[in-house]
Amino acid sequence: MATTRLGEAEVHTVGELPAVGSAAPEFTLTNGDFADVTKTPGKRTILDIFPTISTGVCQAGVRAFAKLAPGLDNTEIIAVSQDLPLAVANYCGAEGIEGLIVGSAFRSGFGTDYGITMADGNWRGLLARSVVVIDTDGTVLHTQLTPAIGTEPDYEAAVAVLR
């Protein structure tokens, strides 16, 4: 179990992020067309994980990773939340955001498998803000659970492992 904060409240997750150097758990998410999304074999993957696209910080994270995407060779960025896939896809479309994949976890055990479902607090059941970077062979290169849900992740640390 890991700990982050939601406002002033301490919040626990159901587990821990996968360890750097370990094999990333396989996942199946749902995109804006309700099709399955999995890690593309042979590509590096950044999982931008957040509670809901309805908050400014979550929106900022999606925009920031989308801006970084063109400079990252052989890398896909998947925006992961418990939101319905239409919500994130509609937000990205309305904002002109391109370069990332919508990946809703609403049908899957992703949050449990990655240890980042919030187990308590007002937002229990949503995903805690975090980042996981996975290499082409499925090895975890980097993880970060932000110290607070309202804190943006360290974008530079996430992409630095890919350079």
Image (cartoon, helix red, strand yellow):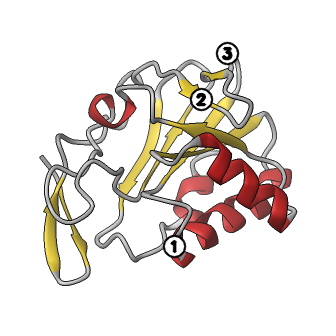
- Secondary structure beneath label 1: loop
The local crowd at label 1, few if under 14, some if 14 to 19, many if 20 or more residues have their Cα within 10 Å, is few
Residue type marked 1: Thr
Marks 1 & 2, CB-CB < 8 Å contact: no
Residue type marked 2: Thr
Q: In the picture provided, is 128 more to the left or to the right than 119?
A: right
- Secondary structure beneath label 3: loop
Report which residue position mark 3 lands on. Answer: 41
**Can residue 99 be seen in the rendering of this structure?**
yes
The local crowd at label 2, few if under 14, some if 14 to 19, many if 20 or more residues have their Cα within 10 Å, is many
Residue 135 drawn at (x, y percent): 57, 30
The alpha-carbon separation of the residues under discs 1 and 2 comes to 21 Å
- Secondary structure beneath label 2: strand
The alpha-carbon separation of the residues under discs 1 and 3 comes to 32 Å
Residue 30: mark in rendering: 2
Q: In the picture provided, is 161 more to the left or to the right than 12?
A: right
Residue drawn at (86%, 52%) of the image: 70
Residue type marked 3: Pro
Residue drawn at (68%, 22%) of the image: 35
Which of disc 3 and disc 2 is earlier in sequence?
A: 2
Which of disc 2 and disc 1 is earlier in sequence?
A: 2
Residue 122 falls in which quadrant of the image? bottom left
The local crowd at label 3, few if under 14, some if 14 to 19, many if 20 or more residues have their Cα within 10 Å, is few
Q: In the picture provided, is 141 more to the left or to the right than 123?
A: right
Report which residue position mark 1 lands on. Answer: 55
